[in-house]
Image: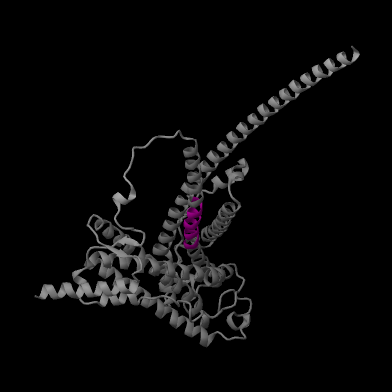
């Protein structure tokens, strides 16, 4: 009898313990599920916040690119190029003040606001670093521009009624020591504006790539949670395609379309290479020298490498322009623009050649400060004035070459779009650029022969 009571008690305890464990497991699963839902909601909010921040930064950097590019062009056209062209030729141009507040429209508040609000916590480290480097350089430029405005207001504006010779030394076309900062600061500001405009464009592309990743991720998640939809039956692939199209591309139907595509490719390659050379020239030679020079640190002069412009290949464009019957295929406006590009590049190569050869002759290997600067002077001696002038002239020439290609690329793109409506045959992707060029030239000769008949 006692054994029976003990057995029943054990059974009741085991049942109660089992129900207790089941209840605990149920409560745990409920809490864990609520935690997962909350975590998913937080992830969605972070994703949404990240998209909003990236979109705001993309818009901001697009404005930076336009404003800095516009400021660079305005400064070069109205002040930099006229002054340095005359100054390099031995004339005495007036040190014209730049309008006060010329950089006041550049707003840097959005990044500081994001730093204070913690908004950058959702961004990748690489993106944060890229943006911070840009704003650091932008702040340096703004500081330099503020010093330039302050010196202009204190030293040039009060003397605006003076003759131009007042600002120059009695002998020689050099500015007086009191005003030598004008040349150095004007050049440094111009170079920095161009460099920052390019960096704003590259930073914008980084932000756009990151935004595109977030957008695709968001769309993929929406597709995963979207209800399945039954699609109507489609015919088998064999019924649609008789042969694979993996290795085929649409080819232009005539010589003009082929020439447009070929020119677009060659101009794009040339533009990218010129941009690479110009950026390297600014970062390695021009900006470091003029930044130090403008601050009175007396930097040493250095030789410009003879192979600076190595890799610029204009033969494809030259061959096409020299091809027989090319005037029958391409418009005169396009041909004139291409010839202008080749002329600009040829002139730039000449400027570089003369500059590099003179450096090789006059800048010695065992150079020292006393060779280039007089005692306690902050400007190079008159016999070496050609160096900063040539350094600036070569930078402007490289910039002009790059600017000449941009409208041509736009023109070629518009012409190519107008050809897209034509029916086109199919050719293999394995055709090389050389084969395409030969096809263009051969077609041009055929067209010309038919016209003569």
Residue 197 in the image: state x and y as whole percent.
Answer: 47, 58
User: Relative to 134, does residue 276 appear above or below in the rendering?
Assistant: below
On the rendered image, what quadrant is the N terminus found in? top right
Q: Is residue 2 visible?
A: yes
Q: Position of residue 132 (x, y in %)?
A: 58, 54
* Residue located farthest toward the left when viewing the structure as drawn: 453
Relative to 335, say whether 34 is above or below. Answer: above
Residue 323 point in image, percent of width and height: 24, 77
Residue 317, quarter of the rendered image: bottom left
Which quadrant would residue 86 be assigned to in this image? bottom left
Most common SS among magenta residues:
helix
Residue 202: in magenta span: yes
The stretch of residues the image draws in magenta is 194-207
- Residue sitting nearer the eye, 288 or 450: 450
Name the residue rendered at 83%, 19% in the picture. Answer: 10
Say which residue appears at 48% left-offset and 85% top-offset. 357
Which residue is pictured at 59% across the width and 50% down the height? 124
Residue 163 visible at all: no
Q: Is residue 399 left or right of residue 183?
A: left
Colour scheme used in the picture?
A: one colour
Left or right: 407 as drawn, with respect to 393: left
Q: Position of residue 205 (x, y in %)?
A: 48, 54
Which residue is the extreme one toward the right?
A: 2
Instruction: Give whichever of 376, 111 is nearer the camera.
Output: 111
Report the quarter where the C terminus lies: bottom left
Q: Residue furthest top?
A: 1
Quadrant housing residue 395 = bottom left
Residue 244 is one of the magenta-drawn residues: no
């Amino acid at each position: 009898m006692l054994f029976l009571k003990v057995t029943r008690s054990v059974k009741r305890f085991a049942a109660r313990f089992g129900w207790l464990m089941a209840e605990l497991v149920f409560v745990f699963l409920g809490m864990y599920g609520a935690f997962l839902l909350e975590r998913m909601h937080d992830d969605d909010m972070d994703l949404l916040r990240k998209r909003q921040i990236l979109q705001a930064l993309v818009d901001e950097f697009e404005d930076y690119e336009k404003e800095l590019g516009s400021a660079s062009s305005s400064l070069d056209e109205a002040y930099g190029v006229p002054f340095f062209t005359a100054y390099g030729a031995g004339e005495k141009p007036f040190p014209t003040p730049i309008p006060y507040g010329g950089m006041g429209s550049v707003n840097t508040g959005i990044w500081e606001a994001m730093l204070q609000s913690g908004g950058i916590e959702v961004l990748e480290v690489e993106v944060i670093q890229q943006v911070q480097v840009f704003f650091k350089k932008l702040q340096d430029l703004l500081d330099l521009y503020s010093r330039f405005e302050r010196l202009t207001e204190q030293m040039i504006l009060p003397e605006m009624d003076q003759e131009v010779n007042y600002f120059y030394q009695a002998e020689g076309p050099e500015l007086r020591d009191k005003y030598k900062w004008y040349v150095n600061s004007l050049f440094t500001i111009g170079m920095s504006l161009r460099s920052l405009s390019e960096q704003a464009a590259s930073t914008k592309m980084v932000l756009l790539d990151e935004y595109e990743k977030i957008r695709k991720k968001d769309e993929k998640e929406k597709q995963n949670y979207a209800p399945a939809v039954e699609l109507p039956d489609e015919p088998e692939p064999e019924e649609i395609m008789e042969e694979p199209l993996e290795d085929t591309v649409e080819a232009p139907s005539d010589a003009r379309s082929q020439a447009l595509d070929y020119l677009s490719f060659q101009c794009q390659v040339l533009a990218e290479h010129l941009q690479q050379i110009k950026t390297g020239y600014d970062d390695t030679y021009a900006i470091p020298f003029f930044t130090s020079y403008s601050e009175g640190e007396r930097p040493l002069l250095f030789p410009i490498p003879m192979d600076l412009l190595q890799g610029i290949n204009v033969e494809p464009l030259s061959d096409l322009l020299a091809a027989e019957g090319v005037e029958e295929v391409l418009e005169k406006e396009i041909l004139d623009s291409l010839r202008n590009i080749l002329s600009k590049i040829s002139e730039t190569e000449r400027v570089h050649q003369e500059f590099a050869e003179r450096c090789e002759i006059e800048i010695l290997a065992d150079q020292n400060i006393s060779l280039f600067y007089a005692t306690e002077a902050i400007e190079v001696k008159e016999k070496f004035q050609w160096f900063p002038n040539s350094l600036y002239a070569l930078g402007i020439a490289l910039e002009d070459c790059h600017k000449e290609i941009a409208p041509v690329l736009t023109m070629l793109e518009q012409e190519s779009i107008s050809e897209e409506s034509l029916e086109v045959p199919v050719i293999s992707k394995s055709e090389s650029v050389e084969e395409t060029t030969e096809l263009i030239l051969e077609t041009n000769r055929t067209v010309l022969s038919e016209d003569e008949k």
